Amino acid sequence: MAARERVLSGMRPSGRLHLGNYLGALANWVKLQDDHECFYFSADWHVLTDRLDVRDVPASTLEMAADWLGAGLDPERSTLFIQSLVPEHAELHLLFSMVTPVSWLERVPTYRERIEQQEIASPSYGLLGYPLLQAADILMYKARYVPVGIDQAPHVELTREVARRFNNAFGPVFPEPDVKLTEIPKVPGTDGRKMSKSYGNDIELADSPETIRAKVRPMVTDPARKRRSDPGNPDVCPVFDLHKIFTPQPDLDFCATNCRTAGFGCLDCKEILLKHMLPPLEKIRDRRQHYAEKPDMIKQVLVEGSRRARAVAQRTMTEVRSAVRLTP
């Protein structure tokens, strides 16, 4: 039987995940378990590139892992681990920093974007070098694919360049990974903007059906529908974007027609959405709750996953040290 191709991806531990996180990444991670060897990690060292107060990170890691498990990640089929429990990542990052020109890092689009967006007056080396830590995360496990959105593709391309540079200097240690582009659906928040925890417009995977209903019912819709008798345009309606994700075609067409003809009001449309949206989210929430009530079980999953990941990382670093040949 042929070995399954390896996939690696990670998330920063920012606490509970929302619907956008699930549809944009986590649902795809769950599917990839079926026919790939999967490594998924909590990128806790990456948090330090943004801020130094990390007192919330341990609790946020457990909340995020509860969402992973609730969504269907299976510790028997995937290796779930914490980056900082595999110190080999730091060693490989150091070696990559020795072979990578600074100009390569400065041209990564997100570097300048983060400086501007976060108004960082004096960026740290860690912020400049975090794409190299990402490269170490990926190449440590010799991943065949890295599932990312199109905005993260430049980071994987840099990883390929770093692998080539290292291999040319020291010998063929690392295969070059490929991007596995994830088609991210448009997931609007309750105010119509992109769903984001920072906007306070998110629907969390941990939310109860009552909470989700309370968030969806006042959601913004087509601004042209000021009265129930006004026809609307589903193509500009955030609620209809959610319909396209959750609602089967017959009801989707029914909602579109009744929106355009003012055949029903926006609350009627939202009730149909909730009918299709709540059952799958309730399954995730129930599984999540099972783990959230047992934080020691989550810790055990992550510690055991980190042990398995570290065994792979140690084998890789044995090859790396043999190639670099620093010690007698």
Image: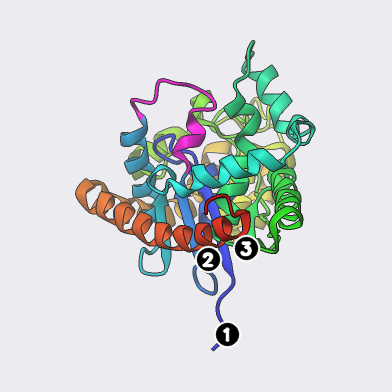
Q: What's under tag 3, amino acid-wise? A: Pro
Q: Is residue 211 above or below residue 158?
A: above
Q: Earlier in the sequence, mark 1 or mark 3?
A: 1
The overriding secondary structure of the stretch rendered in magenta is loop
Residue 261 is inside the magenta segment: no
Instruction: Say which residue appears at 33% left-offset and 25% top-offset.
Output: 55
Q: Would you name the residue on which mark 2 appears?
A: 31
Depth check, front residue: 97 or 300: 97
Residue drawn 74% across the image and 53% down it: 169
Residue range highlighted in magenta: 43-56
Q: Residue furthest bottom?
A: 1
Task: Report the side of 208 relative to 100 (left or right).
Answer: left
Task: Work out whether residue 310 can be spotted.
Answer: yes
- For mark 2, does the 10 Å Cα neighbourhood hold few (<14), some (14 to 19), or many (20 or more) residues? few
Q: Single out the mark in the foreground, 2 or 1.
A: 1
Q: Residues within 10 Å of mark 3 (few under 14, many from 20)?
A: few
Distance Cα–Cα, label 3 vs label 2:
26 Å
In contact (CB < 8 Å): disc 3 and disc 2: no
Front position in the image: 139 or 76? 139
Q: Residue at image x 40%, y 20%?
A: 53
Residue 250 is marked as 3
Residue type beneath disc 1: Ala
User: Residue 2: which disc?
Assistant: 1
Quadrant in which the N terminus appears: bottom right
Mark earlier in primary sequence (2, 1): 1
Image spot of residue 151 (x, y percent): 71, 42
- C-alpha distance separating marks 1 and 3: 42 Å
Mark 1, Cα crowd under 10 Å, few <14 / some 14-19 / many 20+, is few
Q: Residue 152 at x, y = what percent?
A: 69, 44
